[in-house]
Amino acid sequence: MSVVKKSPWILHYDGTSCNGCDIEVLACLTPLYDVERFGIINTGNPKHADILLITGSVNEQNIPVVKQLYEQMPDPKAVVAVGICATSGGIFAECYNVVGGVGKVIPVDVYVPGCAARPESIIDGVVKALDILEVKRKKR
């Protein structure tokens, strides 16, 4: 019996950042890198998303938003933290309202380092998240 697989959909959320990683995420969608060749589609609806791609650090104001986006996503789901700000708070870590990286608020499956993270690294992180999603689907 064959298993029907759907194309993974990504929800991108920008926390507190300089927008450098956001520009690199957008570069992934251009014909040069073309993340859609893996069947990956960018969506704006968390109820359709399989992967939550987060750039920037988490502050006191966006904690509820990040949690709500994560909770609205159907299981199985994966979270990819892109850039040093999303992994640890980066240059904003010492700011009065920044709590740190995304991992302090929701579970993160893949960390993509860099300031700003290169498109190749982002695509590699998303492909690793696809493997994690497959493992999570088999466990269900």
Image (tube, rainbow, N blue to C red):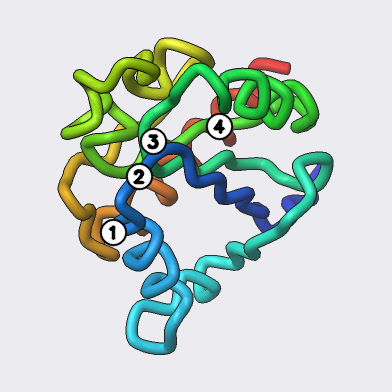
* x and y, in percent, of residue 61 in the image: 56, 23
Measure how far apart labels 3 and 1 are at the Cα level: 14 Å
Amino acid marked by disc 4: Ala
Measure how far apart labels 3 and 4 are at the Cα level: 10 Å
Residue beneath disc 2: 17
Amino acid marked by disc 1: Gly
Q: Is residue 88 visible?
A: no
As drawn, 30 above or below 124: below
Measure how far apart labels 4 and 1 are at the Cα level: 22 Å
Nearest the eye: 37 or 115:
115
* x and y, in percent, of residue 58 in the image: 43, 25
Judged by depth in the image, the label closer to the viewer, 3 or 2, is 2
Mark 1 or mark 3, which is nearer the start of the sequence? 1
Q: Is residue 136 visible?
A: yes
Q: Residues within 10 Å of mark 2 (few under 14, many from 20)?
A: many
| Secondary element type, mark 3 | strand
Residue beneath disc 1: 20
Q: Residues within 10 Å of mark 1 (few under 14, many from 20)?
A: some
| Secondary element type, mark 4 | strand
Q: Report if the CB atoms under discs 2 and 1 are less than 8 Å apart.
A: yes
Question: Quadrant location of residue 96?
Answer: top left
Measure how far apart labels 2 and 1 are at the Cα level: 8 Å
Residue beneath disc 4: 78
Q: Residues within 10 Å of mark 4 (few under 14, many from 20)?
A: many
Q: Quadrant of the N terminus?
A: top right
Residue beneath disc 3: 81
